[in-house]
Image (cartoon, rainbow, N blue to C red):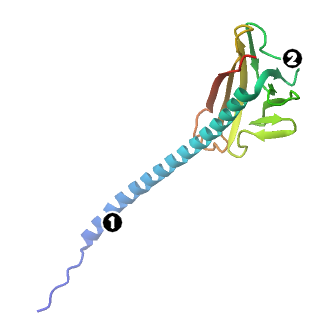
């Protein structure tokens, strides 16, 4: 005698389709959420890397090379008198102790980018294709003529392609350092 072939009934097929219909949207939803989180982390990392690079570059150069602080290429030193506090904004320059002819190097915010210039050379400290900088500020404080100037650097960065508003506000980067007493 031959064996009867067992096949799925219509009800079993319908139950299988209903279960798949419930399972597949859940899997797709999880995949979309994971992809969105990866995108958010990637954008956050881009902004953090850009800000960290700019801040570290400015801090290292100022600590190793700055002698005096100038505003807008004005030859009068800022923050060299007792009890002075100066809020400096656009185009902040420092006397360069490494250069025997006493040249200066400057930092400026222009078109959403922080750049460094020395002589005829300009370096972009933030990537114009990835981030936008704002509220760039260098502040100088000095308690008295014998104490070293305290320099505070701060700026905001946000993702340039912030279409989906990954960050509700720009990220704040700041540091402070002491110029060597001369």
Q: Residue at x 78, y 40 (%)?
A: 123
First in sequence: mark 1 vs mark 2: 1
Q: Residue at x 63, y 25 (%)?
A: 175
**Please, what secondary structure does the residue beneath circle 1 have?**
helix
Residue 71 image point, x, y percent: 83, 22
Circle 2 sits on which residue? 76
Q: Quadrant of residue 86?
A: top right
**Quarter-of-image position of residue 106:** top right
Q: Determine which residue is flagged by label 1.
A: 17
Give 127 or 168, whichever is nearer the viewer. 127
* Mark 1 vs 2: CB contact within 8 A: no
- The residue carrying pointer 1 sits among few (fewer than 14), some (14 to 19) or many (20 or more) residues within 10 Å by Cα, namely few
Residue 15 or residue 140, whichever sits in front: 140
Q: Residues within 10 Å of mark 2 (few under 14, many from 20)?
A: few
Please tell me in which quadrant of the rendered image residue 14 appears. Answer: bottom left
| Image quarter hosting the C terminus | top right
In-front residue for pair 178/37: 178
Residue sticking out furthest to the bottom: 1
Q: In percent of the image, x 66 and y 45: which residue is there? A: 161
Answer above or below: position of 132 versus 94.
below
Residue 133 placement (x, y as % from top left):
70, 35
Under circle 2, the secondary element is loop
Left or right: residue 162 versus residue 20 is: right
* Quadrant the N terminus occupies: bottom left
Alpha-carbon span between mark 1 and mark 2: 81 Å
């Amino acid at each position: 005698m031959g064996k009867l072939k067992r096949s799925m009934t219509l009800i079993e097929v319908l139950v299988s389709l209903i279960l798949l219909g419930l399972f597949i949207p859940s899997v797709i939803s999880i995949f979309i959420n994971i992809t969105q989180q990866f995108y958010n982390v990637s954008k956050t990392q881009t902004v953090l890397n850009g800000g960290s690079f700019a801040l570290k570059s400015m801090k290292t150069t100022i600590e190793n090379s700055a002698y005096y602080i100038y505003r807008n290429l004005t030859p009068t030193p800022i923050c060299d008198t007792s009890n002075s506090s100066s809020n400096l904004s656009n185009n902040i320059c420092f006397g360069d102790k490494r250069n025997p002819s006493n040249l200066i190097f400057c930092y400026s915010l222009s078109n959403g980018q922080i750049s460094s210039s020395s002589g005829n050379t300009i370096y972009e400290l933030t990537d114009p294709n990835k981030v936008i900088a704002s509220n760039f500020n260098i502040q100088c404080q000095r308690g008295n003529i014998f104490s070293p100037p305290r320099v505070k650097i701060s700026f905001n960065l946000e993702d340039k392609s912030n279409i989906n508003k990954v960050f509700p506000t720009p990220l704040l980067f700041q540091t402070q350092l002491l110029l060597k007493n001369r």
